[in-house]
Amino acid sequence: MITSPNTAVDLYCERTSAEFWAEPVNAFSNLSFIVAALAIVWLMRRTEVRSSGPALFLTINLVAIGLGSFLFHTLANRLMMLADLLPIFIYQIAFLLFYARCVAGSKALTVAGLLILFLLVNLGFMQLPKEWLNGSLVYGGALLFILAIAAYHRASGKREPAILYLAVIVFALALACRSLDQWICQWSPLGTHFLWHLLVGGVLYLTTRAYVLNQPPPHPSGAE
């Protein structure tokens, strides 16, 4: 950690200066999001599923998450923190909306209610002290909603019914790594935040895959 926090946003063990490459492992571990996006593209090309607008949006958002996080872990300023957080938030909202509307087939009013509930739950988690679990509780709402969607996904017999439960397990491990980063600095100067990136890349691949494989089929040509 750097000793003069005014020179850069200093949140992780690996950063020991304000230099651009002060967090090389944290920066390059964001390749996991790019790999996840490429894996989704490969999935859509090798299977019978279509590359719908929502599927493409989620895939492009994976790339945006990786680029935004890379910029934050190199430039380390408040503007780049927004570039890091905003694509993650957009992905959460988009996945919830697309899954509820297109996969679960929920009516617009139900989808709107779910969105409001999601925002309220996240707002509640944001009120908790940032010192708790190194700020990881801000993702508590996302974890709860993935768990709820996973239960629906399995109960309704969707393709790969356990995939979102797997996403929940990996996400819990990712949150543990994010929470431990500051606590283990004295024993491991590298920290564990890079593991958060690697694991969350896997989580977003799994959730995007769940959508892609279960999205509604295209309308027949010429159909109303």
Image (cartoon, helix red, strand yellow):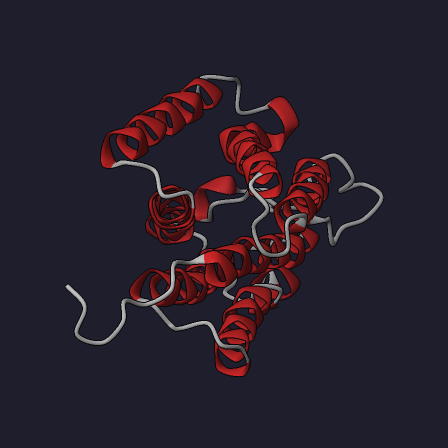
Q: Is residue 65 above or below residue 148?
A: below
All told, the count of numbered labels is 0
Q: In this view, does 113 lie above or below 179?
A: above
- Report the side of 117 relative to 184 (left or right): left
Residue in the picture at 31% in, 34% down: 111
Q: Is residue 106 above or below residue 217?
A: above
Residue 16 in sight in this render: no
Residue in the picture at 62% in, 42% down: 154
User: In the rendering, at what x and y percent does residue 118 appear?
Assistant: 39, 28
User: In the rendering, at what x and y percent does residue 25 appear?
Assistant: 65, 64
Q: Quadrant of the C terminus?
A: bottom left
In the foreground, 160 or 168: 160
The residue most toward the right is 187
The residue most toward the bottom is 46
In the foreground, 207 or 36: 207
- Report the side of 184 relative to 193 (left or right): right
User: In the rendering, at what x and y percent does residue 140 appear?
Assistant: 55, 29
User: In the rendering, at what x and y percent does residue 216 appear?
Assistant: 38, 58
- Report the side of 14 relative to 5 (left or right): right
